[in-house]
Amino acid sequence: MAGGGGADLKLQGPWASPHVLRVRLALGLKGMSYQYVEEQDLKKNRSELLLQSTRPVLVHGGEPVRGTSLNMVQYVDEAFAGVGPSLLPDDPSERAAGRYLADFIDDTLIKAMHEASWGKTVGERAEGKKQVGGAVQTLEAALSECSNPFFGGNTAGYVDVVLGSLLAWVHATDAMQDVKTFDPATVPLLAEWTKHFGALTVVHEVMPEETELANFLPKAFPARGRSGQWFNHVVSALLFVFVFLPLVRKWWCTISPGWVEPAAEEIPRVISLALSMAFAGWFLERCRIVFATLMKILTS
């Protein structure tokens, strides 16, 4: 890349982090040359990369640039003001509006996306999806006020970099949840914006492949929830066989002294019946999910 920087500027962080990506996008849009050191040692909880805004390490002239990735993008824009296009507008009011939207993306949209995909309960995930929808509508309204293809005007700027760094994550998590966050039917301006931003050469150079990111990410909790239901069925069956049945047998022997207990050979049959009931419950749940999915497809 042409421009300033070079060996004097180094960025380190994992390729899958959108916070690393936004710094790379900012450097690319300004035409900066820099050394990128890809961090290989990723945390086990990979979904947390979406939240870790302090994950990137940016070093300029041997000194680290402290703060979040938003601070780093602003630093790049200000420290190299004479290199390439400015990411933040010159007007103080417009600069404040851009910073507000960037903070909104980090504090509201990103946290809601994380909750929608990896919330611990069905309720948390549903609330997360609701918040994502509200946040996207807010961004749609903000883009409508710009009357331009980008938040930064005719060229991509600060807010475009911050939101654009999430595109691969949005598409990957959309595929996991079978939803469309930037749906042309509900947010036509943002849907069009994704095309304009995705067509930029700088974006092509650094944006992760969506399929690669989808394979990297842990599966969403809804899938784990279904596995959890199967586990619950098995546990319930075992409790039924080894706890509930013996209590019923003891109670029945008390009120019916003449009752003859079944032979030991009958116990495996009882266990088999209980496990069969558990499997039937799991199978019916799967049928319900398939039916609900088909109905959603037919009515959409």
Image: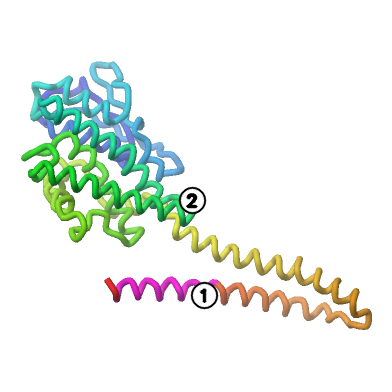
Name the residue nearer the viewer: 278 or 214. Answer: 278
Q: Quadrant of residue 17?
A: top left
In the image, is 170 to the left or to the right of 200? right
In the image, is 249 to the left or to the right of 173? right
Percent coordinates x, y for residue 170 in the rendering: 28, 50
Q: Which residue is mark 2?
A: 120
In the image, is 278 to the left or to the right of 211? right
**101 shown above or below 64:** below
In reply to whether residue 291 is colored magenta, the answer given is: yes
Residue 283's disc is 1
Residue ID at (32%, 31%)? 56
Q: Quadrant of residue 151?
A: top left
What residue span does the magenta drawing correspond to?
Answer: 282-298
Residue ID at (46%, 57%)? 122
> Is residue 201 at least partly visible in the picture?
no
Sequence-wise first label, 2 or 1: 2
**Amino acid bearing label 2:** Lys
Residue depth check, mark 2 versus mark 1: number of the one nearer the observer: 2
Q: Residues within 10 Å of mark 1 (few under 14, many from 20)?
A: few
Q: Secondary structure at mark 2?
A: loop
**43 shown above or below 212:** above
